[in-house]
Image (spheres, coloured by chain):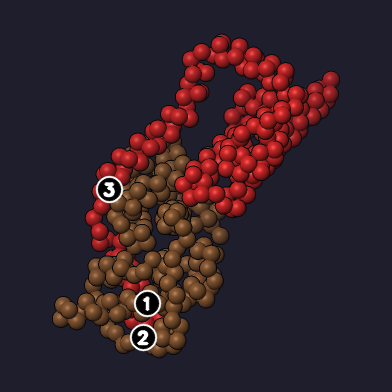
Amino acid sequence: MDNLEQHIRNNRAQLDQIEAFDEGAIWAGLQQELTQQKQARSGWQLQIGRNWQWSIAASIALLAAAWLFWPQPTHQAAQGNIAQYFPELAAQEQAYQQLIAQKEVELKIEQLSPIQFGDLLDELQLLDDLHEDHLADISKFGENQRLMQALIKYYEHKIRILEHISKEIEKQKNHDKLNHEVSI
Amino acid sequence: MNAHPRPDEQQLIQECLAGKQAAQWQLYKKYAKAMYHTVVRMVVQPSDAEDILQDTFVKVFQKLEAFKGESTLGAWIKRIAINTALSHIQKNGRIRFLQVQEQYDLAVPPPSFEASSMDMRSIHQAIKQLPEGCRVVFNLYLLEGYQHQEIAQILHISESTSKSQYQRARRLLQQSLKKNLALSG
């Protein structure tokens, strides 16, 4: 290491004090963006909260419609998020989406206890957020293999978490059953 | 390896996660200046650096729950800032690395140079004037503590390219600072 490198390393902290920048404007922009994202996420939940009877009725109607339409094969590949950028993955994505939707209905995901499954539900939320980031990255930086793999992995991770939840529910059921038998 | 955030960081993180704006401001205030300088030395333009800083902290607050304390909070935020800056640089194509004339640039020892009297402001400005590729390598290696192997992986270059770009940056920096010294003295 020469004396310039040594000098820079010795005074490294000073290098972070040189330029002035508009700290307040960046903070304001940051808060605005966070608020917008929060509103976009909670909008759907708020609507449900205010009209819960209608929401239940709508959910039942939605489930009925899903039950009616699921088994029928579709001739046109659904244009999922990844398929917009990588058409060759349309069929794979459609299969994953169907499997995930099916599992979410089986698990009654909306009714799961946040106390019992909070960590796993948070992980699903984090996955969805990362997925959104990756999709935004495609529109920003163009398509590439690494992003494509990350997008497909999202579905695989999500299915694994849903399977994990399913096993936990099964375990709980067996545990309850055993306790019931013992008490009899 | 530490598996939990430090106690003083833990409190701040919990309050940020609870959505307390005062805590978010405290965290932002604590790290914004260092992150801004790290980023501006990589992208040069202040307006770009400000956009990247905002994106960085949006990511920080979105993903804070995922921070498990494997590093310090500052190091975790810096990694996000550097990755965001690199994505910004790469969005218009790969980083441009000017070819190093190895026989000249690497075999000849750098001119002797007394740096201890150099003020850090001149060094900061001289770093920003380096060509893009070697500037990024120089920042990552000398200022951010990355190893050449790591830089090679991040920038999709070979380890030897990282090393030669670093040497090139070092030489150009010395030349530029010497020139400034001669002009001012």
Q: Write down the chain letter for disc 1.
A: B
Residue at 72% across / 29% down in the picture? A75
- Position of B23 with respect to A60 (left or right) is left
State the quadrant of the N terminus of chain A.
bottom left
Residue B59 showing in the rendered view: yes
Asked whether A55 or B28 is in front, the reply is A55
The percent coordinates of residue B179 (x first, y second) are 23, 79
The percent coordinates of residue B176 (x first, y second) are 28, 76
State the quadrant of the C terminus of chain A.
top right
Amino acid type, residue under disc 2 in the picture? Pro
- Residue occupied by mark 3: A23
Residue A122 showing in the rendered view: no
Amino acid type, residue under disc 1 in the picture? Arg
Extreme residue toward the front, this view: A75
Q: Earlier in the sequence, mark 1 or mark 2?
A: 2
- Residue occupied by mark 1: B170
Residue at 53% across / 68% down in the picture? B157
Residue at 32% across / 75% down in the picture? B173
Disc 3 is placed on an element classified as helix
- Which color was chain A given? red
- State the separation of the CA atoms marked 1 and 2: 9 Å
Q: Write down the chain letter for disc 3.
A: A
Q: Could you confirm whether marks 3 and 1 are on the same chain? A: no
The nearer-to-camera label among 3 and 1 is 1
- Which color was chain B given? brown
- Residue occupied by mark 2: B110
